[in-house]
Image: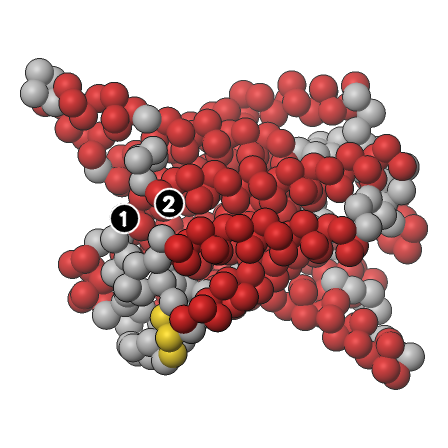
Amino acid sequence: MLKEIFLPLVGKFSFLNIFQYITFRAAYAAVTTLFLSLLLGQAMIEWLRKQKLGQEIRDEISDMHKSKSGTPTMGGILIILSIVISVLLWQDIKNIYTWVCIVSVLGFGAIGFIDDYLKIYKRNSAGLRASFKFTAQILLSLIIVSFIYINRGIETTLLYIPFFKFPVLDLSFFYIPFGVLILVGTTNAVNLTDGLDGLAIGLVILVGIAFGILTYLSGRIDYAQYLQIPYIAGSGELTVMVFALIGASVGFLWFNSHPAEVMMGDTGSLSLGGIIGVIALLIKKEILLVIVGGVFVLEALSVIIQVVSFKTRKKRIFKMAPLHHHYELSGWSENKVVVRFWILGGLFVILSLSTLKIQ
């Protein structure tokens, strides 16, 4: 919005030309979300506490985290609010990707909000029925991916694999179910990871740093040609969204670090997973997302393996799933699990960025 307001005035005030630069607007999008998070965070925590919107702890992990019962949840509202305000201010509102991202953040956040509200209203950790929640995620993903497909460019349906310069396949119409799978998988992976203070939000910051670099490079034809990666016209604006995401996440971590004053809830985890998945789709990094978000993938796989093993063999592979609880039950402190998972997440980010040249 600020770009549309100030650029026409460049003839009179030449210094306003700075608003055309993505790097400038991305930096201040991060500053804006960070400022809003820190400014509004404590007030929102107090409001959530007064509304008695406290976290219900699963029975099987109550011994480890019983002290967290009643901690204000639905802190994802703060993340979503700060991101949307910042993006509307600093991102190009004429860019189609701006609105795809906003719809994703608000849509998945709404599903998570309903789930969180029902958990608190019913005073249990069940929330929405799994079938309803999953169906809602699929329908929203279908709408988003179908919109991307209808407005597709040359690269949209092509499938790229890390370490390979050229696309390996044109998915054509099958891009739609593929995209839905990416979005649903990413939202649930982030949601499953959100189980320890600061764990998921710290990993989102790391993923955001990687995507901040990737979106900027993908939106610059000179850099894209040099690195031999897909050039996606207009995708450079996604850098603003990613930096807004980073700023909001850092601000939320201020309150979510151990011992957490607030939890993001499904409101936050689903919205964050949704925006990460959408950005991966838009810049053609769907498969690379498996590496960038490697810890999220491991967390989701641990749940799948645990369920399949128990249903087929009546035996558990892990002491508890998702994976972070397994290590807690193995004797690691909560802080140690979080920091070590962050380190692992950083290694995945480095590996993912290395693919820019190793191909």
Question: Residue 232's x, y, as percent?
Answer: 28, 57
Residue under the image location 67 percent in, 64 percent down: 299
Question: Residue 139's x, y, as percent?
Answer: 62, 52
Q: Amino acid at mark 2?
A: Tyr
Residue under the image location 26 percent in, 28 percent down: 3
The answer to whether residue 275 shows anywhere in this view is: yes
Q: Classify mark 1: residues with Cα within 10 Å, few (<14), some (14-19) or many (20+).
A: some
Q: Nearer the viewer, residue 334 or 166?
A: 166
Does residue 126 appear left or right of residue 283 in this picture? right
Residue at the spot of label 2: 97
Q: For residue 322, which quarter of the picture?
A: bottom right
Does residue 357 appear left or right of residue 33 in this picture? left
Residue at the spot of label 1: 234
Residue under the image location 76 percent in, 51 percent down: 132
Question: Residue 75's x, y, as percent?
Answer: 66, 33
Q: Nearer the viewer, residue 81 or 233?
A: 233
Q: Is residue 67 above or below residue 160?
A: above
Residue under the image location 45 percent in, 43 percent down: 101
Distance of mark 1 from mark 2, alpha carbons?
Answer: 8 Å
Give the SS element for disc 2. helix
Q: Nearer the viewer, residue 139 or 4?
A: 139
Does residue 155 appear left or right of residue 317 in this picture? left
Q: Amino acid at mark 1?
A: Gly
Residue lying furthest bottom in this view? 313
Q: For residue 342, which quarter of the picture?
A: bottom right
Question: N-terminal of the two: label 1 or label 2?
Answer: 2
Marks 1 & 2, CB-CB < 8 Å contact: yes
Q: Which quadrant holds the N terminus?
A: top left
Question: Residue 313's x, y, as percent?
Answer: 88, 83
